[in-house]
Image (cartoon, grey):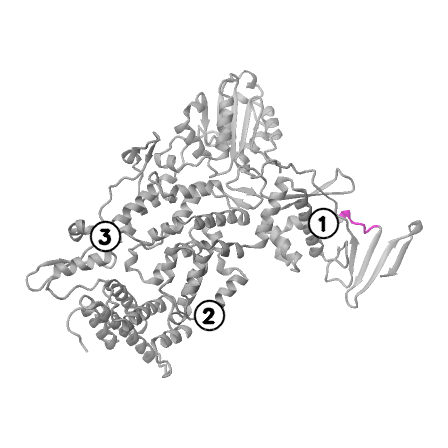
Amino acid sequence: MMIQGFYTLKFLENIAPGAAQSAKKMEELLFEDPGSSIVKARLFAEEILNEVFKQEDIDAPYLSTLYDKISYLTREGYIKREVQQALDNIRLTGNKAAHNSEFNDITEAFKLHKEMYKLGVWFSEVYSLEQIKIPIYEVPKPRQKEDIKELVNRQILELLGTNGLQSILQDKIESTELHIPVVEQEADHEQIEIPRVEVATKIGKQEEYKDSSAASEVTLASGKNYGILNKDLGVGESYLIRELRRLMDSSQEAIENANQFSSFKNYMHVDRKIQLDLENILKNNKDRSNGNLILLCGSVGDGKSHLLAYLKENKPDLLKNYHIYNDATESFSPNKNAMETLEEVLNSFSDQNIKGSEEKVILAINMGVLHNFINTKHKEYSYETLKQFVEQSDLFSPNITTFFSGENFDLLSFGDYHSFELTDKGVISTFYSSLVKKVFADSNDNPFYLAYEEDQKEKINTMVHQNYKLLQNNVVQDHVVQLIIQTMVKKKLVISARAFLNFIADILIPDEIQNTHMMPQFDVLESALPNLLFNRKERSAILNAMSQLDPIHRRSVNIDQLVIQLNTLNDWHHIIEENIKDESAKEWLKPFISKNNLQEHSFNLFFESFIRITFLTNDQFFGKISESSYLEFLRSLYFFNKGHKKGIAGFYEEIRKAIFKWKGSPKKDYIYFNKPTEKYRLAQKLNLNPTMKHLKPSSENVLESFKSTILLAYMGKSPEELIYLEIDFPLFALLSKVKEGYRPNKKDEEDAIKFVEFIEKIMSFGEKKSELLVHFPSDERFYAIKRGAFDAFVFERE
């Protein structure tokens, strides 16, 4: 059957004529009666499914409703997630139109037309034996000539919003920036412009923003110059997306250079303790006449270049007379290696020249390179004075070294300046929280906020804008920062300011960007910040670690209760209102207020989104499902760095229990020392003697400098003989499980090799030379072998 005239899904005529007929009617009604057009879209979906049942030879007369048919095909594997969600979008919106005669939203009709196209393409690819040429998707165009200008104006207003738009409507209609296609009328070739589905598709295709801070700088009341907002984009382009792209690793702003500091970096700068300590050292050294070497020791990407560039730009007087070497391992000459280059840089501070030296140098250097340099035998000069200074600083010891000063030297260690702080109530991060405020603060000094406001005036509203609005919520900000700290503690990530800002861009900007008015609701959910946060593990090491903190993978009675409610209650309105603590996020979920509306993949997407949104917006829920072993580790970490004796004693006792559980214990204070596979087990008495004398307590209540692992020490036969055990979070988490009855396997032992070696050492403190306990597991018999009078052994049953 051939249907006259062109329409988007005409390619279905030979393989699904009924569906093609419905598609044509849908397009014809779209501009005249959007509500009826939506009903035709629903009929199209039914026709497509009927064809699938026919092609697959499925005889199921009991599947009478569209819901039942979608559910059956999904459950049996005939349709995948994307197809099922397109069907659900059409079904849900079609139900609204069928049961509410006043539901006449042309925006929804445009959305469904694109979903129909997806279904048509899928059906033809799977079930057609012909070679069908499928046209590129185009938005339906009005067929009638009458009052066409008024019709066009009305459609654009409905798509883009009316507030403040009338005055610029004509410019928008004539603008190619809005991607408005031209339709040629048959009678008089009048050109008519109507909005495409992607109202502002150029939003998603903007070129990488290059810093034009010189052109965009304005002077604030404070007297400082910052690049606020350069309004130079075309109609329909997003200022917010342009500004946010400056946070990405691919941005020009990502390039750190100790000699350059842009106005944008100046705005984004956050003071850190290491910067303030360096400034104090420079102030104290300002009037000294003898030579001075300041060592900035750390690792790649920890902010050394940024710090030096900031000081050069903002406090040049402090650096006066200093030569700065940001990476002295890069040779000045192709014939010199790293050690020879350093010898040249540090010549004035060799043993032979240091007494007469007046040179002042700041050297940013990686700790490994410094260690190699001071322990290398040099040809012409020696550096024993420098070596002694570094050793006295405890830079390479377990002790904390933030800064250390000597006669000619000063040293700052980036490794002991953390990006977060320990408190008696948990962890906080002044640094990351301040960076977040720089991006999301409601302030006229904030270029990101000004860009967001400018886009709102122009009615540009993408998921980037909605995600930005969500992250303006202080509770969401706090939870995101807490998750960042978790990745650092649990996964030992080192997250620089640059990496953190790139992470912020990653959770705001989805892969595809379009106006939310034209997005199917499932696409809105998938592009929402909570899903970008946990579903993009391939994009970076941070997001990979973040995916492992996804709340949907946690076992919690609170999550179980929500699962039960979602599966047993039909009306979800109350559940959404009660749990989601952000109004904009609620709007993402409100289209799905009934269990009867969703199935399989659609339900899973709703459930995952619901849990993640609740986790980020609901402070009480966030606390309830936080991992207890993580919180306990942070509390103990604070106790050891603070010197809290009661807390330290309690931790030692918990580790004692874990040690005895790891090896096995027949009775109190006895520990097995042979393998459990042997015919009988041998145990010895073991008394552990923990000590705190190796600890250096802090007098501060909020700890900015601390060791991120817990160092235990046990005394041996004499108080001077100490055995150390360093516990990080992965080992602590494993020992916590062992303490609760978990039996470590071979992989656990390989992962915890240092702990296994510690146990072997600590077993030497036992009393097996004077007493043994023999256990026969087969019949639970116990025998004691003891050394009696005159060194004779006594063998008796316990």
Q: Are marks 1 and 2 in contact (CB under 8 Å)?
A: no
Q: Which residue is mark 2?
A: 567
Label 1 CA crowd tier, 10 Å (few <14, some 14–19, many 20+): few
Residue drawn 85% across and 51% down?
A: 770
Assign a secondary structure to mark 2: helix
**Residue 163: numbered disc:** 3
What is the spatial separation of the Cα atoms under label 2 and label 3, in whole angstroms?
41 Å
Marks 3/1: CA distance?
A: 75 Å
Q: Nearer the viewer, mark 3 or mark 1?
A: 3
Residue at point 28% right, 45% down? 454
Secondary structure beneath label 3: loop
Residue positioned 73% across, 47% down in the render: 762
Q: Position of residue 666 (x, y in %)?
A: 76, 59
Q: Amino acid at mark 1?
A: Glu
* Residue 385 to residue 271: above or below: above
Q: Amino acid at mark 2?
A: Asn
Identify which amino acid the numbered label 3 is placed on: Asn
Q: CA distance from mark 1 to mark 2?
A: 52 Å
Q: Quadrant of the N terminus?
A: bottom left
